[in-house]
Image (spheres, rainbow, N blue to C red):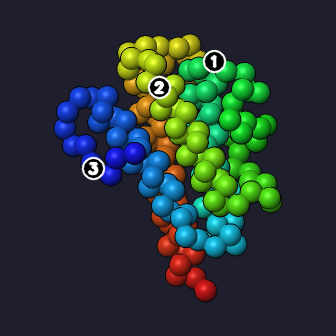
């Protein structure tokens, strides 16, 4: 991924750059935390720094591998029943493992998305007809929201003994 911010140019390049920036922002909210802090629950839900990244990896698989590529669950990288809307992280998964899982899922998403034009559409259960543009924008929104959650959790972790 390029570290140079794209601020003008083709729509596709702008959208993909913003999505990659939000992916990286989400990872940065957890990078360098201890395993204990990455799993520390500060809110009533299962939302923790590590679970936000685990959830994001699942979102990548569901939207790109399942919906757009039409892959069966068994063909998806790291797919499990936990993908369906949870933030569950197994005890034996480290923060580094989950970051690698998200990065791998993101790379596969980039490859899948590249096969489609922004205006290409798919009929998605529970969503209706969606375009690749919508999918990329929805992922920007998803990861930006969760990066914000992660920022708040990290701030609480660092300021709380």
**Rendering coords of residue 50 (x, y %):** 64, 59
- Is residue 43 visible in the rendered structure shown here? no
Residue at the (25%, 43%) spot, across then down: 6
Residue that lies at the very extreme toward the bottom in this rendered image: 161
Task: Indicate the quadrant where residue 82 lies.
Answer: top right
Relative image position of residue 144 (x, y in whole percent)? 44, 49
Q: Callout 3 environment at 10 Å: few (<14), some (14 to 19), or many (20+)? A: few
Q: Earlier in the sequence, mark 2 or mark 1?
A: 1
How far across and down, in percent of the image, does residue 51 sit? Answer: 65, 55
Marks 2 and 1, how far apart at CA? 12 Å
Say which quadrant the N terminus sits in: top left
Q: Residue at x 59, y 54 (%)?
A: 99
Q: In this figure, which residue is indicated by the disc labeled 2?
A: 113
Give the residue pinned by disc 1: 70
Q: Which residue is mark 3?
A: 4
Marks 1, 3: nearer the viewer: 3
Q: Residue furthest left?
A: 8
Element on which disc 1 rests = loop
Residue sitting nearer the eye, 40 or 101: 101
In this rendering, does residue 32 appear at all? yes
Q: Quadrant of residue 86?
A: top right
Q: Residue at x 34, y 47 (%)?
A: 2
Decide: is 34 above or below 50: below
Count of numbered labels shown in the rendering:
3
* Quadrant of res 20: top left
């Amino acid at each position: 991924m390029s570290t140079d911010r794209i601020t003008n140019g083709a729509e596709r390049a702008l959208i993909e750059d913003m999505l990659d920036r939000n992916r990286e922002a989400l990872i940065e909210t957890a990078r360098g935390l201890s395993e204990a802090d990455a799993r520390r629950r500060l809110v009533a839900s299962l939302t923790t720094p590590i679970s936000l990244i685990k959830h994001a990896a699942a979102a990548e698989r569901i939207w790109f591998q399942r919906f757009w590529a039409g892959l069966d669950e068994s063909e998806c990288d790291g797919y499990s029943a936990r993908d369906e809307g949870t933030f569950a992280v197994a005890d034996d998964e480290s923060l580094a493992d989950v970051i690698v899982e998200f990065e791998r899922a993101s790379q596969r998403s980039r490859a899948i998305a590249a096969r489609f034009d922004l205006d290409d559409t798919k009929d998605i259960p529970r969503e209706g007809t969606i375009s690749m543009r919508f999918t990329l924008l929805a992922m920007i929104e998803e990861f930006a929201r969760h990066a914000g959650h992660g920022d708040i959790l990290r701030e609480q972790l660092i300021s709380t003994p």
